[in-house]
Image (cartoon, grey):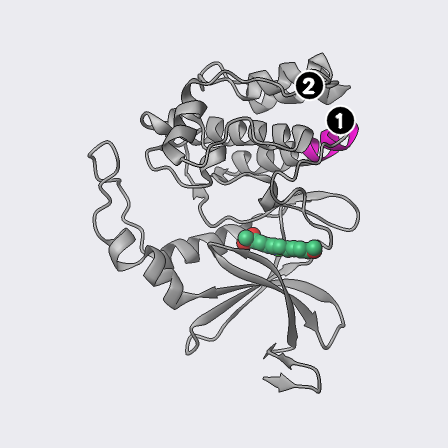
Amino acid sequence: VKVDNTCQYTQINQYLLKQCIGQGSYGIVQLAHDTITNADYAMKIISRKKLLQKGGFFGRLAPQRNKFGKSSGTISHPLDRLRREIAVLQKVDHPNVVKLVEVVDDLAQDNLYLVFELLELGPVADVPNGNRMEETQARKYFCDLLLGVEYLHRNHIVHRDIKPANLLLGHDGRLRIADFGVCTEFCGSEDVLLDNTVGTPAFVAPEQLTGPFYGKAADIWAMGITLYVLIYGVLPFSDTNVLALYESIRNQELCFPGVQDSTSASLKDLLTRLLCKDPNQRITLAEIKEHPWIIA
Ligand SMILES: COc1ccc(C(=O)/C=C\Nc2cc(OC)c(C(=O)O)cc2Cl)cc1
């Protein structure tokens, strides 16, 4: 630890850790300054101890009794999930996906450090902040998201936690998808049938609440919630009570706020198709790429 006259800084190898820039269930992300190259990075700090406590003995190692009474196939150990997350991060390479630069892992230590390229502007719209976004700006971000998700799905990865807080902006305004902490990598088949709900409640697709569901269509639903939030600044389905939230996701009709709603008919059409409650009727990535609002 280095102490200068103002405050204490931690140094990990050549990285001087500065202020916290991200916080979540995963742990924290700090600005990291490379004292050799003078470049800045985002360093995600993962505590193995916390990981074991959170999803460890009580949460994951016991046979998962999911809500359908069946035990879900793979009982994944939290450290296995972490290893898989890192393997996915090391494998992905696309302009619209975060880039992992280095993993600093001192096995003797509790902490594991993931060094990412810094995306200087941070999350695209951290929480529904009431700010509405112009359609042209939202289209730019949504197209970046679309290309990133298409790349992941083509590489047999479903993200499972798409939301504005996980969409980071570089200084060039390009959007990159982050946080593969709950993603699922599937092999061979065209899609993956899942039976456990992970991710963020307000972004969960209706079919996730009633039985086994396909990963790709659930990602597309979350893209719809995300686009709605970027445009309207509020969630389409929300409630402080999570059961009431799930009820509205399943049964409440999609509506567009405000009489002064100046959004285009094509955007409303795309949102309606993204947020179609029946996953078999929901728009696919290929169809999104051809939608009038996208090719406008
Ligand atoms: C205002 O300026 C800001 C600039 C950058 C940030 C920022 O980067 C935040 C989180 N970052 C990340 C989180 C991740 O997961 C949760 C992952 C991952 O695991 O994929 C990667 C990154 Cl980089 C915040 C504010």
Q: Residue at x 21, y 47 (%)?
A: 63
Q: Is residue 142 magenta?
A: yes
Q: Magenta part of the protein: which range?
A: 136-143
Element class at badge 2: helix
Question: Predominant secondary structure in magenta?
Answer: helix
Q: Which mark is residue 226?
A: none
Q: Position of residue 183 (x, y in %)?
A: 46, 44
Q: Could you classify mark 2 by the number of other residues whose Cα lies within 10 Å: few (under 14), some (14-19), or many (20 or more)?
A: some
Front-most of 34 and 199?
199
Confirm whether residue 18 shows in the render.
yes
Relative to residue 61, is residue 291 depicted above or below? above
Element class at badge 1: helix
Relative to residue 38, is residue 215 depicted above or below? above
Front-most of 26 and 241?
241
Front-most of 247 and 292?
247
Q: Quadrant of ligand 1?
A: bottom right
The quadrant of the picture occupied by the N terminus is bottom right
Q: CA distance from mark 1 to mark 2?
A: 8 Å
- Which residue in the protein does label 1 denote? 135
- Which residue in the protein does label 2 denote? 267
Q: Residue at x 41, y 39 (%)?
A: 186
The quadrant of the picture occupied by the C terminus is top right
